[in-house]
Amino acid sequence: ITEGEEGMSKKYKELVLSLPCAKFWDHILYKYQGYWMPSRQLNGIISFQKYFKAQNSDIILCTFPKSGTTWLKALVYTTLNRSHCAPNSATHPLLACNPHNLVPYFEMQIYGDENENPNLENLPNPRIFATHLPFSLLPPSISYSNCRIVYICRNPLDQLISYWYFFTSPSPNYNETNSIEELVKMFEEGICMYGPFWDHVLEYWNKSIERKDRILFLYYEDLKEDIISQSIRLADFLGLPFSEEEKDKGVIEDISRLCSFRNLKELEVNKSEDLWPGVPNNIFFRKGEVGDWVNHLSPAMVEKIKKLVEEKFKDSGITF
Ligand code: A3P
């Protein structure tokens, strides 16, 4: 890797050049503090770690990529703002903005572009942020403060397929079978953005057991199965439980409808606008189903991944 490599930070160049690196499709990953980080985001990651000061009221959404981040952002934003922004209102911000613009990522949006000193003091309270960083890499002030963390995790087979589409769909020249095989191989070696997957999940899982009041661990599949009870759990955890009156008025149903895959996918903003140059909003709304992996992975690949997952999550209590 040379100095001119994509996204190479000038400021942290020396540190970055000393890290192990690997190729992941068209991207370069660096092994930083035990995890494979995209070169383009390293600068933002390091600045986030160095400069972010958490407040007790902050809400931080943490996810492994392609696990349901967009959905979680929509749900948390809508739940927290429901008193002044009714989820059935025709002017709700989610109708005009992609969830990633309402709840920004630290490493990509807030501390991206060499921005070390973003003005975060005047954001409405509670501030809601997101990150793909594993727990052990979060800035110390998050651990010391009483801010709340919500983590969403997804069956790795579906997560992998979602990942595969995300990274291959913009590129017209891929070989379908080889690409998935290659992805499975890299996944097994732990080499994928923010991977290894199992370490990422286990860190949040273990912390969520230690600190139930501060870390809520959700499964994408549970949300798909019963969004109402999971929304109640989420609101309780966020410290804003639904009142009986809200329940009677159907506020939970309104939130789940507004944030549903079908609704968000069909919004004009998500159909036709870009989040960043080359990243259309519609890339975050593909199929939104559980079990789509059966259409893509061979029995041999499935067996390999299942065996690995069984081994890595053995005795943890995590159920996929
Ligand atoms: P698929 O590729 O399986 O369709 P992330 O938001 O972490 O990038 O994850 C993207 C995955 O979540 C995609 O999965 C996407 O379709 C799905 N998704 C996005 N919004 C959703 C929603 N409101 N409800 C359910 N799934 C959603």
Image (cartoon, rainbow, N blue to C red):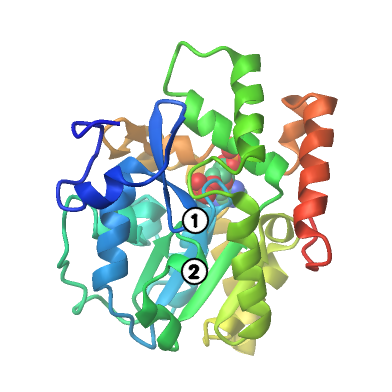
| Ligand 1 under 8 Å from disc 2 Cβ | no
**Residue displayed at 18% across by 50% down:** 113
Name the residue type under label 1.
Gly
Could you tell whether 240 is left or right of 56 in the image?
A: right
Q: Position of residue 18 (x, y in %)?
A: 32, 46
Residue placed under numbered mark 1 in the picture: 34
Could you tell whether 26 is left or right of 229 in the image?
A: left
Is any atom of residue 207 visible in this view? yes
Q: Is residue 24 above or below residue 67?
A: above
As rendered, which of 292 and 135 lies closer to the eye?
135
As rendered, which of 6 and 109 lies closer to the eye?
6
**Residue displayed at 73% across by 60% down:** 222
Q: Position of residue 40 (x, y in %)?
A: 30, 42
Identify the element where label 1 is drawn.
loop
Q: Is residue 194 above or below residue 157?
A: below
* Mark 1 neighbour density, 10 Å: few (under 14) some (14–19) many (20 or more): some
Q: Residue furthest front?
A: 18
Picture quadrant where residue 268 is located:
top left
Picture quadrant where residue 183 is located:
top right
Residue placed under numbered mark 2 in the picture: 136
In the rendered image, the quadrant that contains the C terminus is bottom right
Q: Are marks 2 and 1 in contact (CB under 8 Å)?
A: yes
Circle 2 or circle 1, nearest the eye: 1
**Numbered disc total:** 2
For ligand 1, give the image quadrant.
Answer: top right
